[in-house]
Amino acid sequence: MPKSSLYNHFQRWNEAYYIAYNARSGAVALMTPEHHAVYQKLLGKLGQGEAASLDAAETELLGQLKYGGFVLEDDEDELSRLRFPHNLARYASDGLALIIAPTMACNMACEYCFEQNKSGRMSTELMDRLVDFVDRRGRALRQLIVTWYGGEPLLAMDIIEQLTARFLELGAKHQFDYGGSIVTNGYLLTPQTVDKLCELKVRSGQVTLDGPAVIHNRKRPLKNGQDSFASILENLKHALTKMTVSIRVNVDQSFTVETIDQLLGELTAAGLREKVALNFGHLQPSTKACANIAESCFETRAFSRVEAEFCQLLLQRGFSIYKLPAPKIVCCMAQITNAFVVDPQGELYRCWNYVGDPARSMGNIKDPLDFQHPNFQRLFAVDPFEHELCRRCNLLPICMGGCPSRRMDLGLPEHHVCDSWKYNLEPMLEIIAAAKLREQPKTAKEPS
């Protein structure tokens, strides 16, 4: 007998529709009130074991609901269906993800950065050890994914070139695919550098713009005190013709709707509105070095509220909405055995925020991996299926327990480690639905 999914969300919207969303499948659909009434009757009959008495409209809707994951067979255990791929991904050996910081040096002096005054470059010996690390795993690999990180990785472009060439050789030798991305402040992302990165199979990047020019230049000045915003914006114009680039805005309590609106105006004036993906990052004090910013940071519920307000503004100003409640298998790399952050000294970490802090290392790349190391286990041991609140949560498929380092490092109450979807799913679904209607005006009014 069919039954409703544990992960269904239905909400009334604009009097003309109901939004139907399933967190396990990621399906989003619009239903007219008439179709929602059919759905209610259908649920009643299924609850009473009367599937054989469905009329034509109910039978057709049942098929659509099954297709979207809103309805499933009675013997299907959804929690087990989530847990199995989660555990499989944790121990998979056919993919290797490396976040490599070729240098911890940076050309900026961001006021909130935990990496201030860091220096050092990856040595030739360390590069050899890193290549050997991949080579020893190469036969089992289907894919190697590298993200260049820092510091500012483009200060070590020569290292990126050398390592990429050797990774590509290993890919040919062991028959695995290679892909790259980069997290950069964007100041050195010149057209020439972009073209070279594309040759090196770097297909995507993330650049931070912390507000409009007047605020960004204060929060993220160059080390020499000069402004950075205008140069970054100019670099983005070419970069977005060659690769996918997302802009991250690190949000704290100083940001307002007016602040974001000013930034959107500057991006529009630069001709980037139709090209760029804009995301809002939750600025948090991840280390002791960040203690000076703690009072200006939002807690999760408050951030969720302003995130929805800012996304509503994106919609109003004609920007695309890229923040989607997509199901995921794991929350992050900390829950995967075959993913590592590597710093210029070869130290291995389980979290982006730990890079450059040897006290949080799980070992060095020159030594055998120790999966019993306390700094590996403390984050890897975070399992959403071992937490009662997570197991019972109807947003588990899109959260998977929330950030392990937030859970373990900050001593927050249980509900503060949840993803922002816990607090803003309803307004975000309305924003997403409105964006889809805008993109497909001719077909959006067809009932689902």
Image: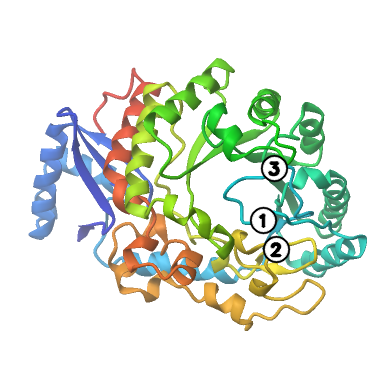
Q: Secondary structure at mark 2?
A: loop
Q: Give me the C-alpha separation between circle 3 and circle 2.
A: 17 Å
In the displayed orientation, state which residue is furthest to the bottom: 372
Q: Position of residue 128 (x, y in %)?
A: 89, 63
Say which residue appears at 33% left-offset and 49% top-offset. Answer: 302
Q: Amino acid at mark 1?
A: Glu
Figure quadrant of the N terminus = bottom left
Q: Residues within 10 Å of mark 1 (few under 14, many from 20)?
A: many
Circles 2 and 1 in contact, beta carbons < 8 Å: yes
First along the sequence among labels 2 and 1: 1
Give the camera-side residue of 426 and 171: 426
Q: Is residue 23 visible?
A: no
- Tell me the residue that label 1 is attached to: 115
In the displayed orientation, state which residue is furthest to the right: 124
- Tell me the residue that label 2 is attached to: 356
Q: Give me the C-alpha separation between circle 3 and circle 1.
A: 10 Å
Circles 3 and 2 in contact, beta carbons < 8 Å: no
Q: Secondary structure at mark 3?
A: loop
First along the sequence among labels 3 and 1: 3
Figure quadrant of the C terminus = top left
Give the camera-side residue of 202 and 20: 202
First along the sequence among labels 3 and 2: 3
Q: Amino acid at mark 2?
A: Gly
Say which residue appears at 39% left-offset and 62% top-offset. Answer: 417
- Tell me the residue that label 3 is attached to: 108
